[in-house]
Image: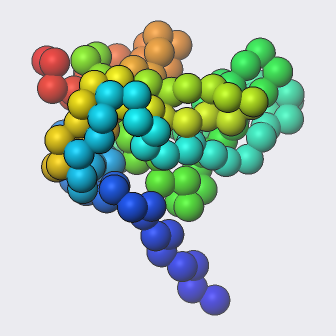
Amino acid sequence: MKAKKPTCPDGVRVGRSSAGLGLFATRAYKKGERIIEYFGRTLSTAEEYTSRSKYLFEVNSRKTIDGTTRANIARYINHSCTPNCEPEIERGRIYIDAIKPIKPGEEFTYDYGEEYFDEHIKPHGCRCAAH
Ligand SMILES: C[S@@+](CC[C@H](N)C(=O)[O-])C[C@H]1O[C@@H](n2cnc3c(N)ncnc32)[C@H](O)[C@@H]1O
Ligand SMILES: [Zn+2]
């Protein structure tokens, strides 16, 4: 059976960006508004050390999520050094919230953090709007 194309939640769309695919607003968002949940499979401790996935998200010292599933639309959000969103962790789940007012058509971005940046972004150069 062919895998179904995941549907985007209201207010967001996947599109081309300077860093491959990205996630864009289809309506205005207020500062502090919740955009989307970043979800996926929780890794075992062994997998945390061996996984080479580009979609790992460390929730806390005991929990890392692999957001590779295409149903996880938040996986399309790119890194920026001047982001307009921020991940918010609540009861072991990850949500992406706006930290600035966002206009329709704007790309959602958050700061991936030093560890991910140094490993996956820096070697090829950051393609965010700040450069
Ligand atoms: C979570 S994915 C983001 C979606 C990705 N652009 C795509 O097309 O599926 C993370 C990967 O996107 C790329 N990426 C995200 N932000 C970037 C940036 N600011 N500069 C360069 N590459 C970036 C890197 O390859 C990174 O490992
Ligand atoms: Zn940058």
Please state the horizontal and vertical placement of residue 33, each as a whole percent of the image.
41, 36
In this picture, residue 36 sits left or right of residue 48:
left
Q: Quadrant of the N terminus?
A: bottom right
Number of callouts: 0
- Is residue 52 at least partly visible in the picture? no
User: Looking at the image, which residue is at 39% across and 61% down?
Assistant: 10
User: Looking at the image, which residue is at 66% across and 41% down?
Assistant: 66
In the image, 61 versus 53, the foreground residue is: 61
Q: Quadrant of the C terminus?
A: top left
Please state the horizontal and vertical placement of residue 34, each as a whole percent of the image.
46, 39
On screen, residue 82 above or below 45: above
User: Looking at the image, which residue is at 67% across and 29% down?
Assistant: 90
On screen, residue 42 above or below 69: above
Please state the horizontal and vertical placement of residue 16, each as a whole percent of the image.
22, 53
In the image, 79 versus 115, the foreground residue is: 79
In this picture, residue 81 sits left or right of residue 41:
left
On screen, residue 29 above or below 101: below
- Is residue 104 at least partly visible in the picture? yes
Q: Quadrant of ligand 1?
A: top left
Please state the horizontal and vertical placement of residue 105, each as a whole percent of the image.
16, 49
